[in-house]
Structures are given as C-alpha cells and as structure tokens.
Amino acid sequence: MLTALLLPAVMAVRESARRMECTSHLRQIGLGLHQYHETYACLPPAWLTDSRGKTAYGWAAALLPFVEQQATSVVIQRQVGLSDAANEQARSIVLPLLTCPSDVAPPVFELYEPGTLTPFLILPHASYLGVYGTSEADEIHPTPPGDGTFINGRPVRLSELTRGLSQVMIVGERSVSMFDTTWIGFDRRDEDAECRILGSALQQPNCQTCDECEFSSRHAGLSHFLFGDGHVRGLSNSIDQAVYQQMARRFE
C-alpha cells in the first residue's frame, strides 16, 4: 500500500526533473542560435540541399559548433549527400542535447520507399524542430516559403521577427509518438521529408487528429517552445488556435 501511495509522487518528481532538463536543452539551443546569429548576421537556414538536390542538411546540423558539438560537426561529410555511405557514422549519432528526456524512443529510425516496406535510409532520433510557421513544409513541392522563422529559400534574421523576439516561437518539440524527427536532415525520397526537421503550428500541440507536422510532447498537458529572445515556455494543449498560430509567425 505504501508503494502504491509513493509511486505517483516519485513518478511526478521524475517527470518534473525531465521537464526541467528539456527546458534546459531548449535554452542551450537558444544560446547557440544567438551566437550563430552574431557570427553570420542570420539564423541557420532551415536546410541546405546537396549539389544533386537529393538530400539536405538541417538547421541543427549547422548549429552544432555553437552548442559545443564541434566533434559531431566534423563527422558530417558535407561535400557529399546525406545518404552517401561517407555519412553512415553521422547518421547514427544521437545527441542528448537535441533529445527530450521524456521522449523515450529508439536511437534511430528507418525511412521507407513510399508505399512499400523497403527501407532506404536510417536517421538519428531528435526531439526539437525549427518552427516553419502555420502551413505544412511538406504539403506541396516546391516547398512554399513559410511564415515562421525556419523557412524555405533563405535564412531569417532576428530583426525580421517584427512581432517582438519574446512573442515568436522559433523551436518546438515533437514526440516520437506523433512522428519521427531528426536533427541531421532529410532525403527527398521521403514523402514527409521537410517535416523531419521542421514543425508547423496548425491547431494545438499534442493534437491527436492533426497532421504529422504538428508539435507535440510526452509532458502532461503541454509542449515546450523556445522563443526568439531565448526564453522557454510550455504551451498548453488547449491553447487558443489563433493565439498559437500567431506565436508561430515571424510577422503580423
């Protein structure tokens, strides 16, 4: 009986610690993004496509030297595509900083040829996504620009967040229970390619009937988001849709 009484309390304490760690991860990502911006006068591009246009390296891959992950950064062979054999080691690296401790998941996941059970690539799991805005990054091709902070076509400057840095969310989390996410990039053979590294504010966090590009978490009742000024906020699953979408846009 004592165990039955204590177990919920112990689990609550553990989840509280995991939430604090998740928040800390996002704050570190925020510091890295601001350092990147100081160096290049912009945030990392949402992705950089390889010379053949077949694969792309994600924004988090560009951020690695600014979050004390230089050793991982040099493993990536950017002179070839992400799916090249030279990047097999890089495609297996799971980074604790880019993983929410509550989001228990296998270290890697497989991509399958559309409509088949034939795997063609393995990618490392991650939990954090750049905010693409209020439309889906993989909805049509060529991909539209997006109204968020990590968009198609060009990198964004912090000065473009005209609603104010404290009012615009730039990175959010997604649970593997919603959709497999990675930090390294994507392969265009994957029909959901861009959504592996980017998220969209469509209805509410943790919406069970929403598109796979939506944000989500395994924290009870909320998901964490990093805002442009570096602060982290948990947004309720029941947040008003209009407010939620407004926070995802970099402009009015």
Image (cartoon, helix red, strand yellow):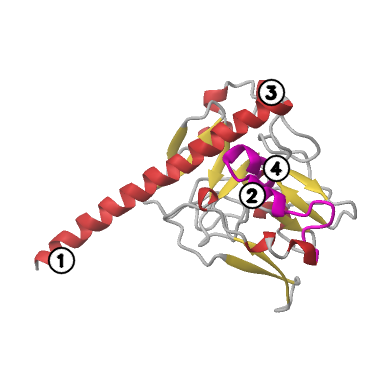
Residue under the image location 74 percent in, 74 percent down: 115
The residue identified by callout 2 is: 71
Disc 1: CA contacts within 10 A as few (<14), some (14-19) or many (>=20): few
Residue bearing the label numbered 4: 62
- Say if mark 2 contacts mark 3, CB within 8 Å: no
Q: Is residue 36 magenta?
A: no
Q: Amino acid at mark 3?
A: Glu
135 over 207 or under it: above or below: above
Q: Earlier in the sequence, mark 4 or mark 3?
A: 4
Q: Quadrant of residue 112?
A: bottom right
Report the amino acid beneath label 1. Answer: Ala
Relative to 184, 104 lies left or right: left
Could you tell me residue 36's position as x and y percent?
66, 31
Q: Residue at x 26, y 51 (%)?
A: 13
Q: Is residue 217 above or below residue 33?
A: below
Q: Which residue is mark 1?
A: 4
How far, Cα to Cα, is label 4 from label 2? 13 Å
Mark positioned earlier in the residue sequence (3 or 1):
1
How far apart in space, not on screen, are marks 1 and 2 (Cα)? 45 Å
What span is colored magenta in the figure? 60-84
Residue 185, horizontal then vertical, whole percent: 71, 53
**First-in-chain label (1 vs 2):** 1
Q: Nearer the viewer, mark 2 or mark 3?
A: 2
